[in-house]
Amino acid sequence: MLLQAMNLSKAYNHVPVIDDFSFEIDEKEIVVLVGRSGTGKTTLMRLINNLEKADQGTISIDDAVLCKQGLRGAEYADRKKRRIYQNKIGMVFQDYALFPNLSVLDNLLEAPLAQKLGSREELTTKAKALLEKMGLAEKIEAMPSTLSGGQKQRVAIARAMMLNPRVLCFDEPTSALDRESSDSIGELIQQIAADGTGILIVTHDTEFGQKYGTRIVSSSEFLKNI
Ligand SMILES: Nc1ncnc2c1ncn2[C@@H]1O[C@H](COP(=O)(O)OP(=O)(O)OP(=O)(O)O)[C@@H](O)[C@H]1O
């Protein structure tokens, strides 16, 4: 099993959003998280991306542990271990969150350069190969504001892939796209999964979820024990 999230609980102001919920993502799986608005889908995605702290539970990818259930709740690993976990998971945000003042190439290079994952030359070669694979070779010097929604989404995916994540998460990947662009993003996600990455998608687009997901998880499970 790639990602394991066990017995997770999270409340905001004492109101539970997730209660004793467990789930897993395996290699090559495309897990689609569906459910009504406000039922905690984004919260779950933020928990496994360490953007939010769990109250209770254990979260790990391979042998990298983000937090472990202790006597008084979820106990988080130290900074160095959290970093190891963090490098195994990537997230593509709904609004893409590209750096507007950086070119496509520099968007891809920023994080791996900051983390000293290679020389500028090596990382540029990798970025070029990824952009080519995504049909964006001619946009390498473009600024994000000049790209279409589908192209921005691809740059955001390429940027996440620069860090070789074991698990890649997507928050509403098709919300700003027409059906044709959605399908090409769906096919790209399938390719990424086929290479061994585990995928988690939060979406309201049921057609997309059914077409590209290998498993559907409903947020109605989050509070079933209450
Ligand atoms: N930082 C926060 N502080 C307080 N409450 C929050 C916070 N973030 C989320 N919530 C609450 O937690 C609940 C779940 O929110 P969440 O965004 O996870 O739902 P969602 O299923 O992703 O919704 P949507 O489909 O509308 O995006 C909501 O009631 C929301 O108001």
Image (cartoon, grey):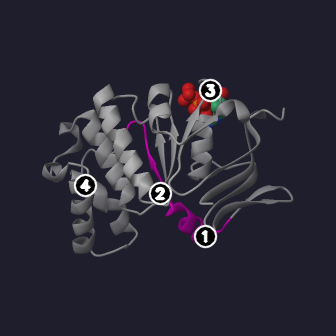
Does mark 3 have its CB less than 8 Å from ligand 1? yes
Determine if residue 12 is in view. Answer: no
The quadrant in which residue 129 appears is bottom left
Label of residue 38 in the image: 3
Q: Is residue 171 left or right of residue 22?
A: left
Q: In this view, does 19 lie to the left or right of 93?
A: right
Which span is picked out in magenta?
77-95
Q: In this view, does 20 lie to the left or right of 220?
A: right
x and y percent of residue 53 in the render? 66, 50
Does mark 1 have its CB less than 8 Å from ligand 1? no
Q: What residue type is labelled 3?
A: Gly
Q: Verify whether residue 208 appears in magenta.
A: no
Cβ–Cβ below 8 Å for labels 4 and 1? no
User: Which sits earlier in the primary sequence, circle 4 or circle 1?
Assistant: 1
Query: Residue 198 versus residue 104: which sits nearer the camera?
Result: 198
Q: Ligand 1 shows up in which quadrant of the image?
A: top right
Select label 3 or label 4 by which is in front. 4
Query: Residue 51 versus residue 188: which sits nearer the camera?
Result: 188
Q: What residue would you read off at disc 1?
A: 81
Residue displayed at 21% across by 61% down: 128
User: On screen, 210 above or below 83?
Assistant: above
Label of residue 197 in the image: 2
Label 1 to label 3: alpha-carbon separation: 31 Å
Please, what secondary structure does the residue beneath circle 3 have? loop
x and y percent of residue 173 in the render? 41, 36
Q: What residue would you read off at disc 4?
A: 133
